[in-house]
Amino acid sequence: MGLKDLDVGDLTERKKLRERLQCKSFKWYLDNVIPQKFIPDENVYAYGHVKSERGLCLDTLQRLENKGTVVLGVYHCQEGGSSAQMFSISREHELRREATCVDIGKPLQNGVYNVVLQECDDKNAVVFEHEQGGQLRHKERGLCLDVEGVESGGDVLMTRCEKNKASQQWKFDKYFKLD
């Protein structure tokens, strides 16, 4: 059940108050006060949980994104829209959350890297290539998100892309056509 389906009771009086005070809509606020704000489910190619074929989802693992660069992990997919598991692929092909973007982190061993969330850089966007149900490929480095050998609660990896490797296949909840 989504929030749109939630019964919040009679809002007639609140709507009348809003009309009497001539309040602007929330959309107006977003468009005019903070137009630079990224809206995770608008004007994106894909949105929602990013689920691997093993049933693990990309997850922040409750690591504090507002405290600088953090390592990204995977966790059993949480029904009901766990915000720690919500990601988008933007029109610019960034794999991102609201204010943080996914990139390659430090090398671990033999061409394997960890994956990090860091503040998005509008001038130097990190581009990911993705087709529905396929790999999430870092365009510049040619590496793919991978969960081979990773358990729930572990850190997701970036490894050499292998076309049909099951641990490199990912699917978002929703896909959209971009104009």
Image (cartoon, rainbow, N blue to C red):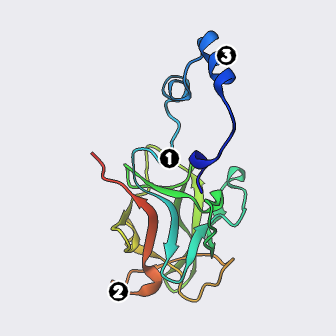
Of the pair 148 and 47, the residue shown nearer to us: 47
Quadrant of residue 19 in the image?
A: top right
| Residue shown at the point (35%, 64%) measured from the top left | 129
Q: Earlier in the sequence, mark 1 or mark 2?
A: 1
Other-residue count near label 2 (Cα within 10 Å), few / some / many at <14 / 14–19 / ≥20: few
Quadrant of residue 24 in the image?
A: top right
* Residue 164: mark: 2
**Residue marked by disc 1:** 121
Residue 130 location in percent, x, y? 36, 66
User: What amino acid type is highlighted by mark number 2?
Assistant: Asn
Other-residue count near label 1 (Cα within 10 Å), few / some / many at <14 / 14–19 / ≥20: few
State the SS at label 3.
helix
| Residue shown at the point (61%, 59%) measured from the top left | 81
State the SS at label 1.
loop
**Residue marked by disc 3:** 17
| Left or right: residue 154 compared with residue 139 | right
Residue 2 location in percent, x, y? 58, 53
User: What amino acid type is highlighted by mark number 1?
Assistant: Asp
For marks 1 and 3, give the one nearer the viewer.
3
For marks 1 and 2, give the one nearer the viewer.
2
| Left or right: residue 159 compared with residue 13 | left
Work out which quarter of the rendered image holds the C terminus and state it.
Answer: top left
Residue 123 location in percent, x, y? 43, 43
Whether the residues at callouts 1 and 3 have beta carbons within 8 Å, the answer is no
| Left or right: residue 159 compared with residue 11 | left
Residue 171 location in percent, x, y? 44, 70
Spatial CA span between label 1 and label 2: 32 Å
Whether the residues at callouts 1 and 2 have beta carbons within 8 Å, the answer is no
Q: Is residue 132 above or below residue 27?
A: below
User: What amino acid type is highlighted by mark number 3?
Assistant: Leu
